[in-house]
Amino acid sequence: MSAATEGSSAMAAEPRETIVGDAIGAAVPRGSGPGAGVVLEASRAKVVAFAFSPGQELREHAARHPVLIHGIEGDLELTLPEEVVRLRPGVVVHLAAMVRHSVAAPRGGRLTVTMLLPRE
């Protein structure tokens, strides 16, 4: 897992900033499926990195919170209810809570998912 450094603030309950040095290296593909690794956890967001070997996929599912899906490496296929998005490096997709989706990696690749969490 990558290391994160946190800034401090005397008045804030949590750091003002968190810097992740290697989000790409936070996950490695596994033999049975994509690898996943938590990159960052904060009060209102959680970032998870996924790494896919060629041919791996995440079956259809939905998140309880809105998410941002960000293509990091490769050329992944994000299947949504009404379309398939080519998730290449730099492409970011916002999904509302409970939108069904799946990810296929015909040639392998990496992405991050940022879960947008409600106030505690």
Image (cartoon, helix red, strand yellow):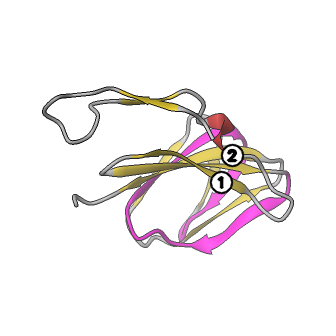
Which mark is on residue 19?
none
Q: Amino acid at mark 2?
A: Ala
Spatial distance from mark 1 to mark 2, Cα to Cα? Answer: 5 Å
Q: Earlier in the sequence, mark 1 or mark 2?
A: 2
Nearest to the observer: residue 65 or residue 10 = 10
Residue drawn at x 62%, y 45% as measured from the top left: 111
Q: Position of residue 8 (x, y in %)?
A: 27, 27
Is residue 116 within the magenta segment? no
Q: Amino acid at mark 1?
A: Ala
80 displayed left or right of 14: right
Magenta part mainly helix, strand or loop? strand
Is residue 70 within the magenta segment? yes
- The secondary element bearing badge 2 is classed as loop
- The secondary element bearing badge 1 is classed as strand
Residue drawn at x 65%, y 54% as measured from the top left: 36
Q: Residues within 10 Å of mark 2 (few under 14, many from 20)?
A: many
18 displayed left or right of 43: right
Query: Badges 1 and 2: C-beta atoms under 8 Å apart?
Result: yes
Judging by the rendered image, the residue that carries numbered circle 1 is: 36
Quarter that holds the N terminus: top right
Is residue 119 depicted above or below 40 in this figure? below
Residue 32, picture quadrant: bottom right
Q: Position of residue 66 (x, y in %)?
A: 38, 60
Residue drawn at x 16%, y 29% as measured from the top left: 10
Judging by the rendered image, the residue that carries numbered circle 2 is: 27
Residue drawn at x 74%, y 63% as measured from the top left: 57
Count of marks placed on residues? 2
Is residue 68 depicted above or below 19 in this figure? below
Q: Residues within 10 Å of mark 1 (few under 14, many from 20)?
A: many
Write down the region rendered in magenta: 54-82
Nearest to the observer: residue 78 or residue 11 = 11
Quarter that holds the C terminus: bottom left
